[in-house]
Image (cartoon, rainbow, N blue to C red):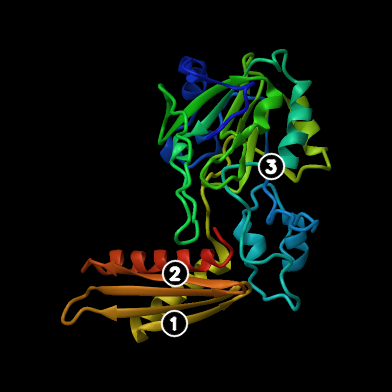
């Protein structure tokens, strides 16, 4: 991870102590597992579905919602609007990739910085946490016979902010520097995963595995964010679930698919975003086997096999359901 000269890598990891004290347990599966509890109000900024290319428009969740007919609501998840029960008559407004995870869209970040500035007394003294996994080495491809390419070694944090299930390098700088990070391995622009001002008046959290960003702060700040038409934002509450939750018709479909797989050895599912094919190959003479899935959508396919090494029928069913679950969500890049 490279930073601008105005940012300073910091060893002041105690500055994040207040966050650790206000996080819910990781296994609670609550929003406050990644953003501190105790703020007056919260908002969730939905990351765009696809970054603009060649001057094309930014595709928002609302655009996909209009296509699918699934309305946005405070607890909405990406797969709900992108994978509707009834297949729409028109082509989806996005292709292949889903929303980026773990980082804000830069125009959204710039708008957020502008909004946040008036709600802290310390905009020039802020802290930025960057997930330690982003400090990995870079790689490039060059034509055969070309001279070697030198990739400068990345500065590594000497001390880490250690939070439940996540470790971060820490930087200090002004609020305006929140858009000064770049992933050295891919040259993608990256916003910090956690950032807050010295007066702790708000906190921004972009968990690495989520396609949205949480903001906690005063009621006035959150009302301001919800009214900012530059951002796609929904209200959030401390008790909101954090992880992807499949229910309703899709849960029922997966359960029926498991029945079909166990009885016939295969199943094919036609969904709004593509098809999922599942094969179950039993080991000879045992209640074990391999589950193979293939997800095909416009722009490509993905798949693979996974052993099911259990004789317990309930555990076997759970593992097969999990693989079908993953294959279905991979159609919309979750």
**Residue at the image point whose x is 46% and y is 75% from the top:** 294
Q: Which residue is mark 1?
A: 267
- Foreground of the two, 157 or 324: 157
Q: Which residue is mark 3?
A: 45
- Foreground of the two, 134 or 143: 143
User: CA–CA distance between discs 1 and 2?
Assistant: 10 Å
Question: What secondary structure is found at the residue carrying circle 1?
Answer: strand
**Residue at the image point whose x is 76% and y is 67% from the top:** 67
Residue 313: x and y, percent?
A: 27, 69
Looking at the image, residue 330 lies above or below residue 259:
above
Q: Which residue is mark 2?
A: 324
Looking at the image, residue 82 lies above or below residue 270:
above
Callout 3 environment at 10 Å: few (<14), some (14 to 19), or many (20+)? Answer: many
- Residue 257's label in the rendered image is none
Q: Earlier along the polypeptide chain: callout 1 or callout 3? A: 3
Question: What secondary structure is found at the residue carrying circle 2?
Answer: helix
Q: How many labels, in total? A: 3
Quarter occupied by residue 93: bottom right
Residue 49: x and y, percent?
A: 68, 56
Residue situated furthest bottom in the rendering: 264
Q: Nearer the viewer, mark 1 or mark 3?
A: 3
Residue 299: x and y, percent?
A: 60, 72
**Residue at the image point whose x is 41% and y is 32% from the top:** 164
């Amino acid at each position: 991870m490279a930073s601008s000269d105005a940012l300073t890598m910091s060893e002041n990891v105690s500055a994040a102590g207040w966050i650790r004290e206000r996080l819910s347990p990781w296994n609670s599966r609550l929003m406050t597992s990644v953003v501190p509890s105790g703020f007056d109000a919260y908002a969730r900024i939905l990351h765009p579905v696809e970054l603009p290319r060649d001057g094309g428009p930014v595709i928002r969740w609302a655009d996909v919602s209009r296509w699918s007919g699934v309305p946005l609501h405070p607890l909405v998840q990406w797969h709900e609007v992108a994978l509707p029960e009834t297949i729409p008559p028109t082509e989806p407004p996005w292709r292949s990739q889903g929303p980026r995870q773990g980082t804000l869209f830069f125009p959204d970040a710039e708008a957020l910085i502008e909004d946040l500035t008036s709600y802290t007394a310390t905009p020039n003294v802020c802290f930025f946490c960057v997930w330690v996994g982003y400090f990995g080495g870079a790689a490039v491809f060059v034509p055969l016979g070309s001279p070697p390419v030198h990739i400068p070694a990345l500065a590594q944090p000497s001390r880490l902010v250690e939070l439940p299930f996540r470790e971060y390098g820490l930087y200090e700088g002004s609020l305006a520097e929140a858009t000064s990070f770049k992933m050295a391995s891919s040259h993608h622009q990256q916003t910090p995963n956690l950032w807050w001002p010295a007066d702790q008046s708000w906190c921004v959290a972009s968990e690495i595995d989520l396609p949205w960003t949480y903001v906690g702060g005063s009621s006035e700040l959150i009302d301001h964010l919800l009214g900012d038409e530059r951002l796609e934002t929904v209200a959030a509450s401390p008790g909101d679930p954090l992880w992807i939750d499949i229910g309703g018709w899709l849960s029922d479909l997966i359960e029926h698919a498991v029945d079909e797989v166990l009885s016939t050895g295969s199943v094919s599912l036609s969904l709004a975003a593509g098809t999922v094919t599942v094969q179950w190959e039993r080991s000879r003479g045992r209640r074990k086997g391999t589950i193979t899935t293939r997800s095909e959508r416009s722009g490509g396919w993905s798949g693979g096999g996974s052993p099911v090494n259990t004789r317990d029928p309930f555990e076997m069913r759970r593992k097969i359901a999990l693989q079908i679950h993953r294959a279905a969500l991979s159609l919309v890049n979750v």
